[in-house]
Amino acid sequence: MTSTGLRRRAAPHTRPADLATAHAVFGCLVREVAAPAGAVTVTPDEVRVRLGATGVVLRCAVTRVSPVGAHRYHGPVRHRLDGGRWAGVDAERLAGLVAAELTARTGRDNPEFIGQVLASRDVVARLLAGRPAADPTPTGDAALDAYVASEQSLVLGHPHHPTPKWRSGDPDGWRAYAPELRAAFRLHWLAVPDDLVAEAGPVEELLAALDPPRPPAGHLALPVHPWQLALVPPADPRVRRLGPAGAPVRPTASVRTLYSPDADLFVKTSLHVRITNCLRKNARYELTGAVALTGLLAGIPLPDGVALLAEPAYRTVDSPGADEAYGTILRTGLRAHLRPGQTPVLAAALAAAPLPVTDPVGWWRRYVGLLAPAVLYAWLRHGVVHEPHLQNVVVVRDADGHPARMLLRDLEGVKLDTSRWTAWPDGVPRQAGYSADDSRRRVVYCLFVNHLAGVCGALADARPGIEPDLWREVRAVVSAVAAELNDPPELRALLAGDPLVAKANLLVRWRRDADRAAPFVPVPNPFGARR
């Protein structure tokens, strides 16, 4: 308290939301701009960068130095002023310095960028201020309540994205649907004439678990995100509103995918909202592709302890525009994969904070031994490219907290390596194909850099100094897979020390490109041989 009795307000660059935003922007700057240019200096205490186009020098303290460049930052980012003095910078000033550097480097401007960084910061501030201390609507099922809590825990978002919580629209429009605010609500339903419905799979059987309203004769019920109906009201007078009904749903980390614990069903809705980079709508090829890939992948084995959450059905309005506005994919639930005493948790929640476990090396050996072989075998044996980033994997833990099973999800991210599929499978849209190079980049980034580096870092935050031991375990698992697969060149290169790659979220946001056009940048290989 000051002498006047008023509490001193924290400087903007020290407030939690601003710090988190500045750390994310600085981390992107280090990974995507400065490190590839050799303009980063890392010590046990800080990371310092010099921006070549503008001459700006920045630094930030670290609590953990990561061998893959995923450092844990602490305190404000500081800017070296004329005369050598250092000054803390808030997220707005940092975004401006980054914008000036990228404009000079690329020759293009992005008038949205600074505003999006600040909007993301403001969302984080709103979430921190408004998040309930406990779930106001628990089900009483301890395992599923813990799972929902993990999905709704990611207040700060992706640590290597410059605008991780930016979402288009008025905040008053999304508060009721924010997973971080522990939201729960009911789906809204449309009655669609039978001859205006496109669908595949056991839609009625799956929807019955949601307790849908009864549509008029000659119509079928279609669940829609209530936010979407506010954004895109039905234009066709033949489509009727039935209102909110059915089992409550909980928004997951993706915002638009909703989980009903009562029905044990996921509903992946279309949502005409830009979240981080993209408009989150289900294109028709994604609807048909989900069902086709579900059928295809049913015949491709996964190792024991790993399973896929299938997407066996979709329903939409079969008219131009409305098909993307109201396209809905149904994804199977969690209960079939749980044994007594087991608890599912989103992998991203494990990586978001220090992860204390009694035997971190043994815990990690089990974790990597479940996940990495499944992804690598699927790719190199079967040409199936999973996208196992932290938001696409559910970890099932036993009563002692040890990894017991891995559940892969979201078939939108599953692709087929076209170099390994000489005959294209019937029904799978061509948009589900990746070249050999794209396949390698996606697997290396999602598995090693996004996922394993994130959880590895959380273990190391709880047990400083253990990270080299953990990466040796990763190398042992990859070596065993390589031996089983007769030393494929893709794994031979990784084990020899070829750099890993990371998706360049800052650069793709600066260019205002779609996610699929994101460039990749090299990052150090923490488990390969030294080159």
Image (cartoon, helix red, strand yellow):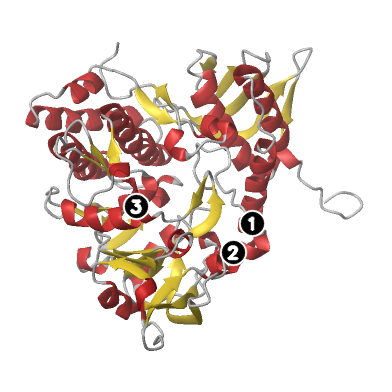
> Counting residues from the N terminus, which is met first, the one under dot 1 or under dot 3?
1
Quarter location, residue 196: bottom left
Q: Secondary structure at mark 2?
A: helix
- Label 2–label 1 contact, CB within 8 A: yes
Residue for badge 1: 169
Residue type, numbered disc 2? Leu
Q: Quadrant of residue 454?
A: top left
434 or 525: nearer the viewer = 434
What x and y, as percent, mark residue 352? 45, 47
Disc 3 designates what residue? 285
Q: Residue 130: x, y in percent?
A: 63, 63
Answer with left or right where residue 489 lies relative to residue 501.
Answer: left
Type of amino acid at the residue the image marks with label 1? Gly
Disc on res. 231: 2
Residue 473, by quadrant, is top left
Under mark 3, the amino acid is: Tyr
The residue carrying pointer 1 sits among few (fewer than 14), some (14 to 19) or many (20 or more) residues within 10 Å by Cα, namely few
Q: Residue at x 28, y 43 (%)?
A: 430
C-alpha span from label 1 to label 3: 26 Å
Q: Is residue 262 above or below residue 410?
A: below
* Residue 16 visible in this rendered orientation of the protein: no
Q: Is residue 519 left or right of residue 345?
A: right
| Cα separation between marks 2 and 3 | 22 Å
**Which of labels 2 and 3 is toward the front?**
3
Secondary structure under the numbered disc 3 in the rendered image: helix
Question: Can you tell which of label 1 and label 3 is closer to the viewer?
Answer: 3
Task: Say whether disc 2 or disc 1 marks the residue closer to the N-terminus.
Answer: 1
Q: Residue at x 35, y 33 (%)?
A: 445
Residue 206: % across, % down: 28, 74
The residue drawn where x is 31% and y is 37% is: 447
